[in-house]
Image: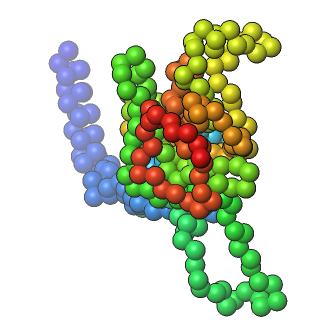
Amino acid sequence: MTRSLILSVSILCLILPAAAQLPPLPVASTDQAEVAPKPEVANLLISPDIVPDLHLQPNFVTAIRMPEPVRDVYVGAPGLFLAEHSDRDPFLVTVKPITNRHSTSNLFIATQSGQLVSLRLISAGETPGSIPIDFVVLYKQQRDFLIPSDDVDESSPSDSPVHKQPLSAIDAAFQGQQQVSSPSWDTPRGPQRPSKIAVSIGSVVADGDGTIVAFSVLNQGGQWVELLPPQIELDNPAAEADKKKKKKNNKGKNVLADQLPITDYRYTARKFAPGQRIDGAVRFERPDFKQVAEQLRLELVTSDAVDRPLLASLPFTVPADNVQPSNIAQQEKPHEPNQ
């Protein structure tokens, strides 16, 4: 045993001096910090003629804020990018790459009013170095079409002038209603007819054989609502209720009022959030005459309460020029005989 101990000590004496002469092992330097991407904030206008690039990177999410509620979101390559939208924040869309490879696709966003936004998605993958990444994209409405310009484009050829298409009567009333900043809202009175929406009647104008009515609708409930196409009815509230119940159409359903033909209508949106306002206009064919007790009414119905329409009284005779009534009562005043 003594000999084994002496042999072990001798071997250690030979190994230790040789190990001391070996070069030290490389140690990772703490000075080489990870390079972070450069965050970017972009402000864009909604335009169907422009498809901007959206620069992304793995492990980062990009927020897209729209100026109005979003209806649908589509991504071209769902296996490469993830796009999300929630009704809890209807104006927000988030998108991020779900692969570490360099990838490209496109993103399509549709708003409640029908506006479309298209973007090209570009992910740099795990690229070393500091590269610009779009963290936030803020979209704004392009309202230049509401302001006619008197400037002449000198660059356009003189032999091919650009002729602006004049607005139709319903489009003029529709755009005029959108510029009303503070409508006067009317709601049905009494607890027996609660309504999720309120209405404000704007301009009323005669258009040939028809009549155009502009209006605004407010969602005063606590949930999203969907508005069905507007209707115009000619009703006689003084008629006996039992006579109305006996009057039926060929399908056996009760007919409570005569529906007038609708030739055209406009909505800024059909689905809108609590507290949100939408604007509209409707053109209908008005009859030549009516009985004294009959009332002309605008009928607005939400998809979840078709049995409780909101009725707004309308004047039967209107001038050819626009009139801006300050307030048309929800319950029409007693009729005076037509002159």
Q: Position of residue 27 (x, y in %)?
A: 31, 50
Q: Is residue 89 above or below residue 189?
A: below
Residue that appears at 60% across and 8% down: 242
Q: Is residue 307 visible?
A: yes
The image quadrant of residue 46 is bottom right
**Foreground pick, 23 / 323:** 323
**Foreground pick, 149 / 250:** 250
**Display coloring:** rainbow
Q: Position of residue 158 (x, y in %)?
A: 77, 91
**Foreground pick, 294 / 263:** 294
Residue that appears at 58% across and 19% down: 239
State the count of labels. 0
Residue that appears at 59% across and 47% down: 339
Furthest residue in direction left, as rendered: 2
Q: Position of residue 277 (x, y in %)?
A: 45, 43
**Foreground pick, 332 / 129:** 332
